[in-house]
Amino acid sequence: MFPQLARFTDAGLLLLRLMVGLVFIASGYSDLTDPEARSKSIEMSKGFTIFLGCAEVAGGLGVGLGVFTQLAAFGLVAVSLGAIEKKLFSWHTGFWGEKSYGWHYDLMFILMNLVIAATDGGRFVLLK
């Protein structure tokens, strides 16, 4: 319908990558700053919480900066799938959630990361 907008595809992918990266870096940072409290809130061990925080920060940096973008995006898909599994089977959270985010939030990030992976992050990446 608007073929002239195709010239902004790479800029749109860059903005998408930056937003996804920022969300995962912030989440991973919160895991790493107080892993003891965070591990209790997500009902996981402290060691796993530290691993999760490192994975989120590394994946967020990879996607945001465009360094091994596809690998980073697939890693963040795995993190999001784990979050959905926890919400569905342990916390019995609905799609929209009750008092907090439902698993629709994680599903959106899975789809965003799949777009990033399928396009290899667009033209504005540092390292493929």
Image: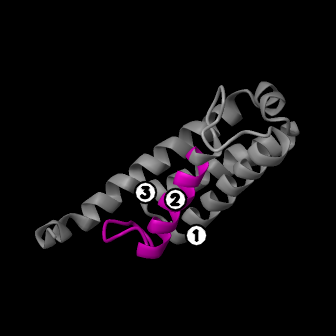
Q: Residues within 10 Å of mark 1 (few under 14, many from 20)?
A: some
| SS category of the residue bearing label 1 | helix
Q: Is residue 44 visible?
A: yes
Picture layout, residue 47 above or below residue 59? above
Q: Residue at x 27, y 66 (%)?
A: 10
- Asked whether the residues under the numbered discs 1 and 2 touch, taking CB atoms below 8 Å apart as contact, a structural biologist would say yes
Residue highlighted by disc 1? 71
Most distant residue in the left direction: 4
Q: Nearer the viewer, residue 109 or 17?
A: 109
Most distant residue in the right direction: 45
Q: Reading the chain from its start, which is encountered first: label 1 or label 2?
A: 2
The amino acid at mark 3 is: Leu
- How many numbered markers are drawn? 3
Q: Residue at x 47, y 50 (%)?
A: 20
Does the magenta-highlighted stretch encompass residue 106? yes
Majority secondary structure of magenta residues: helix
The amino acid at mark 2 is: Gly
Judged left or right of residue 107, residue 44 is right
For the record, the magenta segment spans 105-128
Residue highlighted by disc 2? 62
The amino acid at mark 1 is: Leu
Rounded to the nearest angstrom, the CA distance separating label 1 from label 3 is: 13 Å
Q: Residues within 10 Å of mark 2 (few under 14, many from 20)?
A: many
Q: Reading the chain from its start, which is encountered first: label 1 or label 3?
A: 3
Residue highlighted by disc 3? 65
Query: Image quadrant of residue 34?
Result: top right
Q: Nearer the viewer, residue 92 or 65?
A: 92
Rounded to the nearest angstrom, the CA distance separating label 1 from label 2 is: 8 Å
